[in-house]
Image: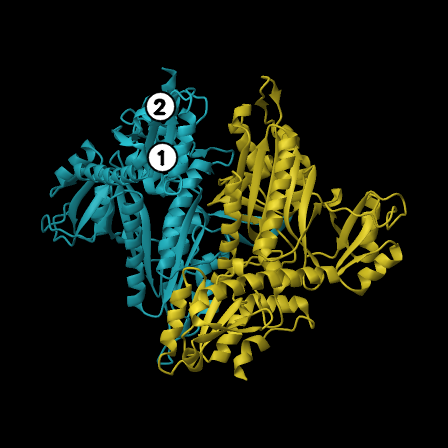
Chain colours: A yellow, B cyan
């Protein structure tokens, strides 16, 4: 049947998950490639998802007192170099601007890979007294990191993100902020992306360049690989000292302030795809679906069908992001197209339905059909969207639980990692050597030290010495 | 009086308008400088204005069927070079990325100065049939142009903007789009920025690199200089031919499509400042004022005053962007601070007012005081904001009319230009030589050939040959 052309064009997940992923981002028209290697064109449907993500997060940031700003996209080399760890972490992967017009620049500048240094310079200019604190800033922008291997949304040379940068008079306040924003990300991931996450702290090895502590939310994808979905960093007063930012405190003494930064990126779109998608393409969580419901008229050439379909669209559109597809493509083609695009709810309406005052809702994620009264359509569609959100969350949680294994011996650890992908929970002594060894033997990295600690055993899974922490390990995107 | 410290720190407009401008953008906390020469830090108050501009425009774009996308920020040199006029116009003022990490790039890339070439490459990839047309795309991003002399908002090496890029099956449709978007900008300028504009077409000399026609809205600033506030370009099929974009039309023939682009930038913030501001600082049009009304309690140590002030804030906040400043600064200091920031309406409330069930509204632009009933406050504040918008528009229109002079002789033209800044209306034969000569003799450029043509005289003001067009001339930012 030609109607399934679109779906037939994508590789099955089980056959080749990576290929399924790239097929899906292209066929669902989220991105296009261009001659700018490692960068992507984000197409309207993909960008609309990002706009919904932005709106949800931006509201949350503003409600908690944050303000948006915009910093220059360039960082002079000397400015990047002010904080030692930071420059070591980022310098190898930045793009350098060396010429402006026809002239060579006196000092080369990189395109921002992140903006700590610019925020620090600005804070030095505007923070003088405890009365100037805290500053709770955020910016939405694009950043560049010169990656060797790239994949749409997951790892690209340019990506879109938000970066929060805050500065406080006390360490306590900055630490609170770091965790507040991590919790904001976790709540958002669960309530808007229907994506369960593990909250925890990164090990020293995995920390952000220049941070005293890095916190993360880690999600598990359909294929069992982990995806770091957002991070929040506590800087202590390290950047303030490097940039000589000081303020007069309430006791009239000069003090160094404390800083944080936190960010998430268009990578979240990759997370959505790999958390919820299936062999028919995307499945979008309703809260960030650009089209939440599509009306497909059946036998639309028959009198009254198209009119009725557009009438339903009108009835729904104040409360639901809905479209009615009255084009001359066949219903089967439309089914396939909107399944590929992951529209959570399809509404079918034909002559018989109209006679009976009914229509049929079809849920994208499990093809469940619901015959509903037209008179009650708005409430039924809203209920269906809620149900879909819950079902997606629960399915993803079950996938994570099914793929999470606790181990207490090194043999089991390596065997588990070799047999299938997923989270491995195991105890760790805290030493970098064990972390490196587990990577070497089992090909996994530490994903996080979860806030919800358990004790599986008193001993490190690797060296047998006393364990300090339970750690989630896994292969990661 | 120490209360006027802030205002005293800014230069008077009549003394030095340029200095007044930079004093104002700094003291009103719109921007900060940084070590990135020619770029600016847009601070929360400045960025909030931009967010309101974005919201208003984005709604208008979406209502007229446009979709947002995101293109890479880099353009490979070979791609930039595909359209001859375009590369000649932009190549001298771009920033070049030559290295990624530690490696020299095989081909250098510029940071986008504008994205026609990227959109063309993408259109070539996705446009094949008349069914794929039109594409009505827009993107919000930052662009870079390596300017030698820069001024905050008006001319900076990096600025924020939106760039619309559309592609159509017919020239007529593309021409309609070009004018539709120009009208959208004009309506927005008048209804949201309270800024009257002259709509018209640029002369060939002032056209966008690669365009067949460039349309503009021109505003006149308080000092009599013109500011090009937004432009809309019709490209014909020139870019399509250069990039070999072809589609199968309804007659099954291969055809070249027709394109447009249109944009406006953070420069609009400069336009707002220079259209409405005065010697006390900013005056913001209510529609894009981050704070539309500020409540300043008088004698706030007296019982009940602060409570009442916050009660008013609560009553207003669903309908008005309002804050209540309950800080321990003096009322006089607060008056001065919010005047500097251009808050359109101030609400004063003290013990006597509370007794009388009244409060006092003070309009920023003319200091008019209105004693209003607290019971009727929401309606009164909303009415005041409407009145302010109208008054600002009319004041700006009067400034433009007072500074617009029609002349018919070259002597008068030069004398008028020398005596004071403003628009000069004069007839023109259409020849580039006369345009150049008027610039040389009088220091003005052609701003636009207005849609509303009049005939002042049958002859070109410069050469005396038969005139083709009435043109607005002026000095420009």
Disc 1 secondary structure class: strand
Q: Mark 1 lies on which chain?
A: B
Residue A384 horizontal/vertical position (percent): 53, 65
| Residue that appears at 38% across and 74% down | A308
Per the image, the residue denoted by label 1 is: B293
Mark 1 closeness class: few <14, some 14–19, many ≥20 residues within 10 Å: many
Residue A25 horizontal/vertical position (percent): 57, 65
Disc 2 secondary structure class: loop
Q: Does residue B104 sit above or below B79 in this rendering?
A: above
Residue closer to the observer: B265 or A364: A364
Residue closer to the observer: B266 or B38: B266
| Residue that appears at 63% across and 44% down | A182
Residue A197 horizontal/vertical position (percent): 66, 53
Q: Mark 2 lies on which chain?
A: B
| Mark 2 → mark 1, Cα distance in angstroms | 17 Å
| Residue that appears at 62% across and 32% down | A173
Q: In which quarter of the image is residue B26?
A: top left
Please indicate whether residue A172 sits to the left or right of residue B145 in the image: right
Q: Which of marks 2 and 1 is in front?
A: 2
Q: Which mark is residue B350?
A: 2
Q: Does residue A181 sit above or below A50 in this rendering?
A: above
Please indicate whether residue A109 sits to the left or right of residue B229 in the image: right
Please indicate whether residue A404 sits to the left or right of residue B167 in the image: right
Residue closer to the observer: B35 or B77: B35
Q: Which mark is residue B30?
A: none
Residue reaching furthest to the right: A464
Residue B468 in view (yes/no): yes
Q: The N terminus of chain A lies in which quarter of the figure?
A: bottom right
Q: The C terminus of chain A lies in which quarter of the figure?
A: bottom right
């Amino acid at each position: 049947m030609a109607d399934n052309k679109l779906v037939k064009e994508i590789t099955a997940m089980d056959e080749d998950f990576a290929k399924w992923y790239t097929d899906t981002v292209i066929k669902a028209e989220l991105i296009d490639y261009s001659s700018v290697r490692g960068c992507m064109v984000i197409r309207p449907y993909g960008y609309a998802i990002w706009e919904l993500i932005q709106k949800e997060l931006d509201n949350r940031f503003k409600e908690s007192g944050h303000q948006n700003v915009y910093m220059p996209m360039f960082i002079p080399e000397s400015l990047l170099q002010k904080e030692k760890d930071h420059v070591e972490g980022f310098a190898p992967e930045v793009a350098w601007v060396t010429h402006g017009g026809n002239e060579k620049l006196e000092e080369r500048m990189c395109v921002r890979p992140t903006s700590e240094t610019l925020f620090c310079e600005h804070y030095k200019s505007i923070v003088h007294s405890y009365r100037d604190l805290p500053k709770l800033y955020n910016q939405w922008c694009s950043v560049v990191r010169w990656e060797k291997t790239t994949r749409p949304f997951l790892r690209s040379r340019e990506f879109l993100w938000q970066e929060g940068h805050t500065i406080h008079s006390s360490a306590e306040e900055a630490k609170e902020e770091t965790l507040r924003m991590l919790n904001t990300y976790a709540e958002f991931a669960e309530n808007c992306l229907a994506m369960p996450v593990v909250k925890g702290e990164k090990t020293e090895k995995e920390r952000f360049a220049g941070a005293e502590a890095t916190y993360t939310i880690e999600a598990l994808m359909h294929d069992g690989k982990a995806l770091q979905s957002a991070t929040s960093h506590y800087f202590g007063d390290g950047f303030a000292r490097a940039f000589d930012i000081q303020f007069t405190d309430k006791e009239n003494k000069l003090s160094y302030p404390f800083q944080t930064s936190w960010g998430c990126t268009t990578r979240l779109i990759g997370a959505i795809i790999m958390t919820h998608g299936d062999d028919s393409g995307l499945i979008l969580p309703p809260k960030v679906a650009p089209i939440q419901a599509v009306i497909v008229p059946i036998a639309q050439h028959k009198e009254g069908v198209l009119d009725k379909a557009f009438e339903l669209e009108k009835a729904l559109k104040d409360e639901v992001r809905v479209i009615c597809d009255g084009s001359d493509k066949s219903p089967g083609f439309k089914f396939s197209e909107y399944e590929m695009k992951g529209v959570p709810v399809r509404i079918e309406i034909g002559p018989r339905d109209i006679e009976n005052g009914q229509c049929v809702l079809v849920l994208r994620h499990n093809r469940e059909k619901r015959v509903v009264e037209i008179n009650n359509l708005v409430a039924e569609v809203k209920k269906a969207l809620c149900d879909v959100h819950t079902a997606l969350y629960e399915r993803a949680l079950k996938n994570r639980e099914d793929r999470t294994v606790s181990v207490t011996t090194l043999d089991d650890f390596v065997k588990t990692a070799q047999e299938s992908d997923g989270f491995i929970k195991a105890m760790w002594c805290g030493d970098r050597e064990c972390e490196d060894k587990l990577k070497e033997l089992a090909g996994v990295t530490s994903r996080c030290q979860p806030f919800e600690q358990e004790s599986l055993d008193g001993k490190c899974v690797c060296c047998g010495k006393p364990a300090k922490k339970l750690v989630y390990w896994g292969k990661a995107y």
